[in-house]
Image (cartoon, rainbow, N blue to C red):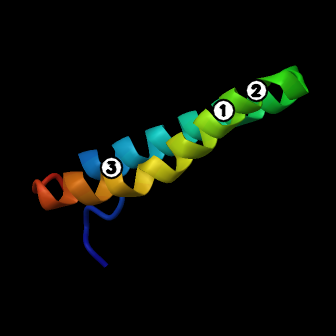
């Protein structure tokens, strides 16, 4: 295993985006059924974490 496993800008950014997605989605679920749009924004943020990581890794930030 690499000595920098998980300690790269790409990993930190992907985790931050993923956590933001879970927080937004969780808050949206607690508010009301009307806020389903906000829930899907949270889902999109969570899914977007993987491409963010892939792009940053390709740019050499991994």
Residue at the extreme bottom of the image, as rendered: 1
Q: Quadrant of the C terminus?
A: bottom left
Is the residue 35 above or below the residue 25 in the image?
A: above
- Position of residue 42 measured from the top left corner of the image (x, y, whole percent): 61, 37
Residue at horizontal 78 percent and vertical 24 percent from the top:
35
Label 2's element?
A: helix
**Number of residue marks:** 3
Earlier sequence position, callout 3 versus callout 2: 2
Residue at horizontal 76 percent and vertical 34 percent from the top:
26
Label 1's element?
A: helix
- Position of residue 19 measured from the top left corner of the image (x, y, whole percent): 56, 40
Asked whether residue 54 is in view, the answer is yes
Q: Which residue is mark 1?
A: 23
Spatial CA distance of label 3 from label 2 is 23 Å
Residue at horizontal 28 percent and vertical 60 percent from the top:
54
Q: Which residue is mark 3?
A: 52
Q: Quadrant of the N terminus?
A: bottom left
- Position of residue 38 measured from the top left corner of the image (x, y, whole percent): 67, 27
Check disc 3: other Cα within 10 Å, few if <14, some if 14-19, many if 20+: some
Label 3's element?
A: helix
Q: Which residue is mark 2?
A: 27
Residue at horizontal 11 percent and vertical 54 percent from the top:
59
55 or 12, nearer to the observer: 55
Residue at the extreme left of the image, as rendered: 60
């Amino acid at each position: 295993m690499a000595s920098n496993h998980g300690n790269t800008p790409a990993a930190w950014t992907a985790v931050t985006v993923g956590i933001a997605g879970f927080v937004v989605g969780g808050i949206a679920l607690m508010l009301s059924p009307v806020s389903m749009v906000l829930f899907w924004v949270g889902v999109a943020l969570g899914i977007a974490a993987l491409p963010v990581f892939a792009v940053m890794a390709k740019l050499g930030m991994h």
